[in-house]
Image (cartoon, grey):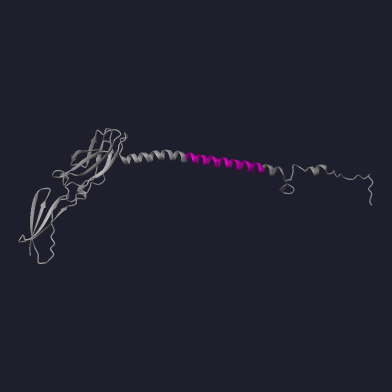
Amino acid sequence: QLYAVAVKDLVRKTDKIYKVKSRNSTVEYTIKKLEPGGKYHVIVQLGNMSKESSMKINTVPLSAPDALKIITENDHILLFWKSLALKESNFNESRGYEIHMFDSLMNITAYLGNTTDNFFKVSNLKIGHNYSFSVQARCLYGGQMCGEPATLLYDELGTGKDSSASKSGRATDVAAIVVPVLFLLLVTLGIGFVVLYMRHRRLQNSFTAFANSHYSSRLGSAIFSSGDDLGDEDDEAPMITGFSDDVPMVIA
């Protein structure tokens, strides 16, 4: 059986026809050299043109550039990204890239231009505005067959830094508060430990001096009374004295 496969390029407005022969009821045919991001109308007819079947297809666009980042200069910023040719065999650097900018405060999207380089300079940014930049493979034929955009937020806010730098700055501010507080806590704990240690040493030295003042070298130990010197009862007890030879002793 003979079939005619017509491929209409809806973007370029061109047609291609392929003849396919098959002896089976199921026919497989590969259409090659379709452009990424293209739009096509495919028509399959019997050789005698009596019957046909058709469908519209869109090919997968080129992927977005990798590693898009912003570097802030004094009065402008620079957008950097990796070459698409590193991962897209269908991309030629001569096609270039186009750059768009969205101002969220003004709700305006602007086309900034295109370049065949892997960087782009942006100037005249307004203080306090938030911008989103997108970089993609340059669109062909009236804004069609574009690549997927890589987008990055630039939160200017008068600081001249991108969103990642702003987050880093906020983290630095938090660290600038937390670190001194932790340091003060550690210093306070250290002083507390020193005070406790000095009090412990003072009490230990006082006890040692007290024990030494009550130490008996004859007994080899320290002797402590339960009261101050002796109790009141000891003061009231009569003193026992020795006996004299000239005092008569009565024995009952």
Q: Position of residue 33 (x, y in %)?
A: 13, 53
Residue shown at 19%/42% (left/top)?
Answer: 98
Q: Does residue 184 show up magenta in the picture?
A: yes
Residue 46: name its quadrant.
Answer: bottom left
Choose between 139 and 197: the one closer to the eye: 139
Q: Position of residue 51 (x, y in %)?
A: 8, 60
Say whether residue 128 is left or right of residue 10.
right
Q: Indicate whether 111 appears above or below 14.
A: above
Q: Position of residue 223 (x, y in %)?
A: 73, 46
Choose between 135 and 182: the one closer to the eye: 135
The secondary structure that dominates the magenta segment is: helix
Say whether residue 248 is left or right of residue 197.
right
| Magenta-tinted stretch | 183-208
Quadrant housing the N terminus? bottom left
Q: Residue furthest left?
A: 48
Q: Position of residue 121 (x, y in %)?
A: 23, 37
Say whether residue 243 is left or right of residue 119.
right
Q: Does residue 87 show up magenta in the picture?
A: no
Say whether residue 190 is left or right of residue 160.
right
Q: Indicate whether 140 appears above or below 52.
A: above
